[in-house]
Every structure is written in structure tokens, then in C-alpha cells.
Amino acid sequence: MADQFADSANNVVIEEVNKGLNPGMIVLIVVATFLLLFFVGNYALYVYAQKTLPPRKKKPVSKKKMKREKLKQGVSAPGE
């Protein structure tokens, strides 16, 4: 709806009121929605993976490394 009023010189001024969303606001809402969906989806996948996947296996320590660590600590390696 247009508002109509007269200014000080009795000129009729018609002021258009833009109702609706600004295109920049629409882009902002769409981008924010996609970001929110992305983070919620990642969190859901993370929770699902924590529940269903087995814990990661540690790499086996080689006998050579174990012997070196024992010597560093001052304890003789077993079997020697």
C-alpha cells in the first residue's frame, strides 16, 4: 500500500512501502540454513560413528623399539 501525504509546499508525495524480503536477506537465510544443516549432519554422523565403529587398534610396538625403551629406563630387556 502506498502512503500519501502533503509536504510543506502542498505537493502530494506518494511513498511506496516495499513489503517482502530483501534479496540479500533471502541469500543470507539460504546460506545460514545450509550451514546449519551441514553442522547438524556432521554431528549426527559423528555420534553414529562413535556408537557403531570399534575403537582403533594401536600399532604393535616392535621388539627393537621395546628393547631401546627398556634400556633408556635402565631396566634390562627380558631374556638378556
Image (cartoon, rainbow, N blue to C red):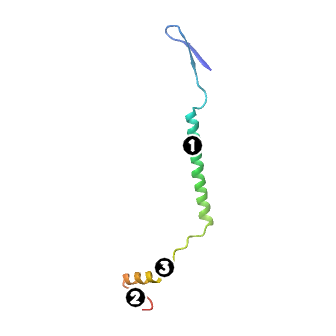
Q: Residue at x 51, y 11 (%)?
A: 7
Mark earlier in primary sequence (3, 1): 1
Near mark 2 (Cα within 10 A), the count class, few <14, some 14-19 or many ≥20, is: few
Q: Which residue is drawn at 57% across and 33% down?
A: 23
Could you tell me the amino acid type at mark 2? Ser
Q: Residue 76 carries which label?
A: 2
| Towards the viewer: 63 or 8 | 63
Q: From the image, state whether disc 2 or disc 1 is nearer to you.
A: 1
Could you tell me the amino acid type at mark 1? Val
Near mark 1 (Cα within 10 A), the count class, few <14, some 14-19 or many ≥20, is: few
Pointer 3 residue: 61
Q: Which residue lies furthest to the top in this view?
A: 10
Pointer 1 residue: 31
Could you tell me the amino acid type at mark 3? Val
User: Gap in Å between the C-alphas at discs 2 and 1?
Assistant: 63 Å
Secondary structure under the numbered disc 2 in the rendered image: loop
Near mark 3 (Cα within 10 A), the count class, few <14, some 14-19 or many ≥20, is: few
Secondary structure under the numbered disc 3 in the rendered image: loop
